[in-house]
Amino acid sequence: MGSLYKDEQGDWITVCLKYLLFIFNFLFWMGGGVVMGVGIWTLVDKGEYLSLLASSTFAVSACILILAGGLVMVTGFLGCCAVIREQRSCLSTYFFCLLLIFLIELVAGVLAYVYYQALSEELKQHLSKTMTENYAQPGKESITQSVDRLQQDFKCCGSNNSFDWMHSVYIMSPEAEKRLVPDSCCKTITPQCGKRDHPSNIYKVEGGCITKLEQFLADHLLIIGAVGIGVACLQVSPALLRCAVQLKG
């Protein structure tokens, strides 16, 4: 009688564990969608600014998140199917996929946080040089468009201030037609509005575009890091439940 009671109790625990694993897998699948969404949002939302960065770490972190998010959604779906069908071979494959995704997301999160520490120095060293040497130059159309978008979106002018443009290749060339700053510095863009650099006409922001872009990228990197590491840590729960199910089964 005692043996029968223990068997029934063990079956009940196993059923509860399987339901919990199914719920965790469903949440895991939803989390994969969130991870993928954050990665896509990072690349799409003002993604043209990536051409202004010396390092590709920011874009790589976002791409890793998109890859991990896709794998999470597929793995979560397979995990739900494995629990419903009670296929141990599928559960073993599921556990291996969890481990792989855990490592991928951890790498994305760590990359984001490491790059976050070096972001300020990179912008100070690279952005000013990029803007003054490559703006409106042949073959640098993407950088020119990125700088114009940057100055309009963040309402700034120059890497540190508007006087940075005095030393640019473009402003010192005949193509500038005596402009003091590019037209994208103007509060209201009109043909050759960059000839007048009065504060009433152009953006005069303390810290220039470096400060604005640094804050924008830092916010995105913090989100990438938090999502990558956070979701990776949450994966430990379904993995432990999976082990418990196999032990009870």
Image: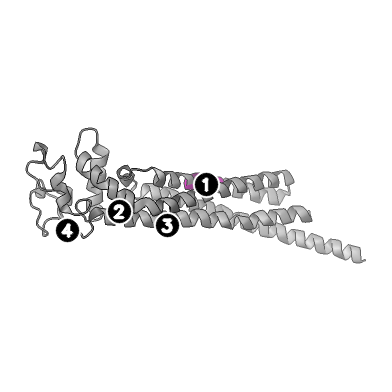
Q: Which residues are magenta?
A: 65-71
Residue 225 visible? The answer is: yes
Spatial CA span between label 3 and label 1: 17 Å
Marking on residue 204 = 4
Q: Could you say whether the residue bearing mark 2 is in a helix, strand or loop?
A: helix
Mark closer to the chain start, 3 or 1:
1
| Dot label at residue 199 | none
Q: In this rendering, which labeled residue sits more in front, label 1 or label 2?
A: 2
Q: Nearer the viewer, mark 1 or mark 4?
A: 4
Task: Assign a secondary structure to mark 1.
Answer: helix
Kindly check if marks 1 and 2 are in contact, taking CB atoms under 8 A apart as contact.
Answer: no
Residue nearer the viewer, 33 or 186: 186
Disc nearer the start of the sequence (3/2)? 2
Query: Which of marks 2 and 4 precedes in the sequence?
Result: 4
Q: CA distance from mark 3 to mark 2?
A: 14 Å
Q: Residues within 10 Å of mark 1 (few under 14, many from 20)?
A: many
Which residue type does callout 4 highlight? Lys
Is label 4 in a helix, a strand or a loop?
A: loop
Q: Which residue is mark 1?
A: 68
Distance from Cα at disc 1 to Cα at disc 4: 42 Å
- Residue, disc 3: 222
